[in-house]
Image: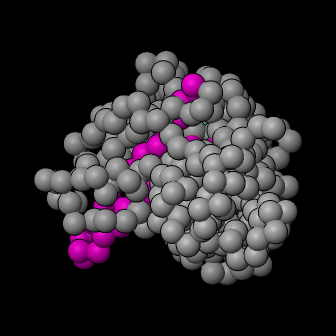
């Protein structure tokens, strides 16, 4: 029998595993705490398990991990990690420490959910890889455990962020389309937000999607995390050209399902992401049209100036153009802010993640 990757099992699966051994059900929760809260690296450290039980666990399975291949540091102290998976594939994870002008601090981790992506967005580097494979739940979670361990090992020492100890926020905005790997992502989200595991409040967790409408609906029913929608165009012809997913799920459908997601749970934050591509989606007319699409909603817009890359055919609009675009939104009562991606100097910025 194949050894069990215990970090990949749901609570129900762990429960039945322990039941099968004639052990009490609370063993499952204890194992979860050892794996995800205390992050031990061997069964022998699980001191409330008998020697016999520990030997049984060793016989049946293992505690998976990731191999750190490289770390890159940006001038803004963003760190990009390249991790190797069990089968030799690699994914990138980005750690972004941050302090606001009021002195508050947070540490956001941007995790990958797939090796590559099959959505084919024309402005995104990950798309050029195609979909290699989905990440398992354990591989999504291990990005958090390994990154947290790296923080604890002192990678932010002698930086303005050396006092930050814990990853406080999580975004699924790395490589891949989270909702195309729905079951594994949902299982991972359960552990991420659970107080016996990673204990990151759902209020501080955001799933970003290119707009798989039916899956957005399902996510709304099964989880209470925040949502970011990569809109990236104001009209269907332009959106279909740069994001093929727009053909089955056009803008109207996307906005409709987002409104529903919002009304069903007002505590959730919803953001529309709009990558500004010079001469493609950045005209005055686009700004007016975008405002029209969002008028009367409470949704905010994140304007992301395109991060250029030699392999991508687009350009970043000028500063003036970006300001004018934002100004039109403002005059039309749509709130937006411009998000200059972090870690641009190390290709850790949005859409620049890919395996080597
Ligand atoms: N697949 C998901 C999440 C990962 S992409 C999604 O598409 O939402 C994360 C964000 O990066 C998306 O909003 C995407 O539109 C943006 N992005 C992709 N390529 C980019 C680039 N070259 N410059 C700026 N943003 C980019
Ligand atoms: Fe995939 Fe998101 Fe990139 Fe589109 S923008 S190809 S959905 S990772």
**Picture residue at 67% right of the left edge, 81% below the top:** 266
Q: Decide: is 59 above or below 20.
A: above
Is 332 a magenta residue?
A: no
Q: Decide: is 167 above or below 155.
A: below
Estimate the x, y position of residue 279 in percent, counting from the top left: 52, 32
Is residue 182 or residue 298 the one in the foreground? Answer: 182
Residue at the limit of the structure toward the top, as seen here: 311
Is 89 a magenta residue?
A: yes
Residue 19 seen: yes
- Quarter of the view holding residue 119: top right
**Picture residue at 25% right of the left edge, 76% below the top:** 102
**Picture residue at 43% right of the left edge, 25% below the top:** 309
Quadrant containing the N terminus is: top right
| 28 on left or right of 81 | right
Estimate the x, y position of residue 146 in percent, counting from the top left: 44, 49
Estimate the x, y position of residue 265 in percent, counting from the top left: 72, 79
Residue at the limit of the structure toward the left, as seen here: 158
Residue at the limit of the structure toward the front, as seen here: 52
Q: Decide: is 247 above or below 55.
A: above
Is residue 153 or residue 264 the one in the foreground? Answer: 153
The magenta segment is 88-113
**Picture residue at 57% right of the left edge, 39% below the top:** 175
Is residue 258 or residue 58 the one in the foreground? Answer: 58
Residue 300 seen: no
Q: Decide: is 263 above or below 38.
A: below
């Amino acid at each position: 029998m194949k050894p069990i990757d215990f970090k990949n099992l749901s609570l129900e699966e762990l429960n039945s595993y322990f039941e099968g051994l004639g052990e009490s059900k609370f063993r499952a929760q204890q194992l979860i705490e050892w794996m995800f809260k205390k992050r031990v690296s061997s069964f022998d450290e699980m001191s409330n398990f008998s020697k016999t039980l520990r030997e049984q666990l060793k016989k049946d399975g293992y505690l998976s991990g990731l191999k750190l291949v490289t770390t890159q540091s940006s001038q803004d102290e963003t760190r990009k990690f390249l991790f190797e998976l069990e089968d030799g594939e690699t994914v990138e994870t980005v750690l972004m420490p941050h302090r606001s002008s009021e002195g508050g601090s947070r540490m956001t981790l941007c995790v990958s959910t797939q090796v590559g992506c099959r959505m084919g967005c024309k402005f995104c580097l990950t798309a050029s890889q195609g979909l290699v494979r989905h990440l398992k739940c354990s591989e999504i979670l291990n990005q958090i455990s390994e990154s947290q361990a790296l923080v604890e090992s002192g990678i932010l020492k002698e930086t303005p962020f050396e006092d930050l100890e814990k990853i406080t926020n999580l975004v699924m905005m790395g490589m891949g389309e989270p909702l195309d790997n729905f079951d594994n992502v949902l299982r991972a989200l359960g552990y991420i937000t659970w107080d016996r595991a990673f204990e990151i409040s759902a209020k501080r967790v955001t799933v970003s999607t290119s707009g798989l409408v039916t899956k957005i609906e399902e996510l709304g029913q099964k989880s209470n995390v925040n949502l970011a929608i990569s809109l990236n165009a104001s009209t269907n012809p332009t959106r279909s050209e740069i994001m093929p997913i727009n053909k089955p799920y056009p803008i109207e459908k996307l906005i409709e399902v987002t409104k529903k997601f919002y009304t069903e749970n007002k505590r959730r934050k919803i953001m529309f992401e709009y990558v500004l591509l010079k001469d493609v989606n950045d005209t005055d007319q686009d700004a007016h049209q975008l405002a029209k699409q969002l008028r009367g909603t409470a949704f905010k817009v994140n304007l992301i100036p395109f991060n250029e890359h030699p392999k991508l055919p687009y350009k970043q609009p000028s500063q003036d153009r970006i300001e004018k675009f934002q100004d039109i939104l403002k005059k039309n009562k749509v709130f937006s802010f411009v998000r200059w991606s972090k870690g641009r100097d190390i290709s850790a910025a949005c859409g620049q993640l890919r395996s080597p």
